[in-house]
Amino acid sequence: MSADPVGEWAWSDAWVLAAAPDTPTGCSLSDLIRTADGINHAIVTLDELADGLGALLAAGLLEVRGDHFRTTAAGQAIKKHWKGGLFGWSRSLLPHLRTLPRPRERFEISRADYDAAVTQYLRRVPR
């Protein structure tokens, strides 16, 4: 652990938060990657995902149950500020994230699990 346990929220953290569902059942890693791609038209990298999930979980904005992720009440409160449609997630969410301390935590995702989740998502994309 670094001497400074708090960092600054990044746009990729807001991206991961935007992609996480507010549903009771949450979503799988593959579905989180799919939603993130739908929001930003790019596949979130392993580092962006592991760093974002770690910080958001440690800050109490997301929770993981088994192999599913979902927003908590605190995360949903931040997502309520999302304005500007599909393209407004960063401008809307990032300022609200930056009112909170950002934990320097990383959610451990192996390269194999990440690659499998991306492959699963891509297999479902119509060509």
Image: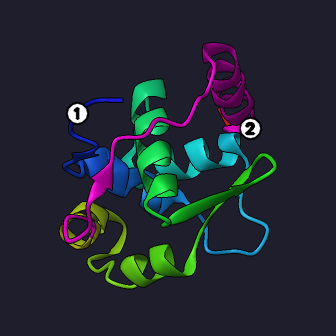
x and y, in percent, of residue 113 in the image: 70, 23
Residue numbers of the magenta segment: 97-125
Disc 2 element? helix
Seen at 61% across and 74% down, the residue is 22
Residue 3 tag number: 1
Q: Which residue lies furthest to the front in this view?
A: 3
Q: Taking 127 as reference, is 59 left or right? A: left
Q: Taking 88 as reference, is 69 left or right? A: right
Q: What residue type is labelled 1?
A: Ala
x and y, in percent, of residue 100 in the image: 26, 68
Q: In which quarter of the image is the C terminus?
A: top right
- Front in this rendered view, residue 123 or 103: 103
In the image, residue 26 lies in the stretch drawn in magenta:
no
Seen at 41% across and 49% down, the residue is 55
Count of all numbered marks drawn on residues in the image:
2
Name the image quarter holding residue 80: bottom left
Colouring chosen for the image of the structure: rainbow
x and y, in percent, of residue 20 in the image: 56, 60
Q: Taking 99 as reference, is 109 left or right? A: right
Name the residue carrying label 2. 124
In the image, residue 100 lies in the stretch drawn in magenta:
yes
Q: Quadrant of the N terminus?
A: top left
Disc 1 element? loop
Q: Is residue 17 above or below residue 85?
A: above
